[in-house]
Image: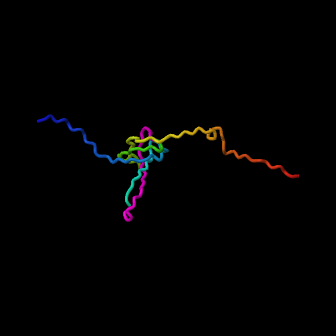
Amino acid sequence: MAATEPAAPKIGHKNEKIGEVISTKMAKTIVVEVTRRTAHPMYKRIVKKRKKFYAHDEEQSAKIGDVVRIIECRPLSRLKRWTLGTVLRRAVEVAVDHPALAAHADTRVKKTIKKKKKK
């Protein structure tokens, strides 16, 4: 008989979803929107369905616009049942260097022209 290696502890299958980060305003929590395409039950037309999931992000590495994989886990809070798996695609950072967007340029100042009074 061949020597058998000890079996590794089997990790159960965890549900995974891929979606886009739409909010990172909470501490260690991200909101991921998962979009799926399904056929309408009566009309058979393809429609998009969206659902938001709250996921735990320990290192706070995800940013708004990133495409991420989230993995199902035990309940961490009232709404969080998912953890961040990996960041699949980073969002594009757009930096605009325009003089009107500088910190010292105040575009809210209203310039008025004083009219001369008639005597």
Check if residue 65 falls in the magenta segment. Answer: no
**Residue most extreme to the bottom:** 42
Q: Nearer the viewer, residue 86 or 82?
A: 86
Quarter of the image with the N terminus in it: top left
Q: Residue at x 38, y 57 (%)?
A: 38
Farthest top residue in view:
3
Q: Which residue is nearer to you in this view: 73 or 19?
A: 19
Name, please, the residue furthest toward the front.
45
| Viewer-closest of 35 and 46 | 46
Residue lying farthest to the left in this orientation: 1
Q: Which residues are magenta?
A: 40-62
| Image point (39%, 64%), residue name | 43
Color style of the picture: rainbow
Residue 9 spot, x, y in % from top left:
25, 40
- Place of residue 32 in the rendered image (x, y in percent of width and height, measured from the top left): 43, 48
Q: Is 28 on the left-hand or right-hand side of 104?
A: left
Quadrant of residue 47 within the rendered picture:
bottom left
**Height in image: 32 above or below 60?**
below
Left or right: residue 81 versus residue 100 is left
Q: Residue at x 57, y 39 (%)?
A: 96
Q: Position of residue 108 (x, y in %)?
A: 67, 45
Q: How many marks?
A: 0
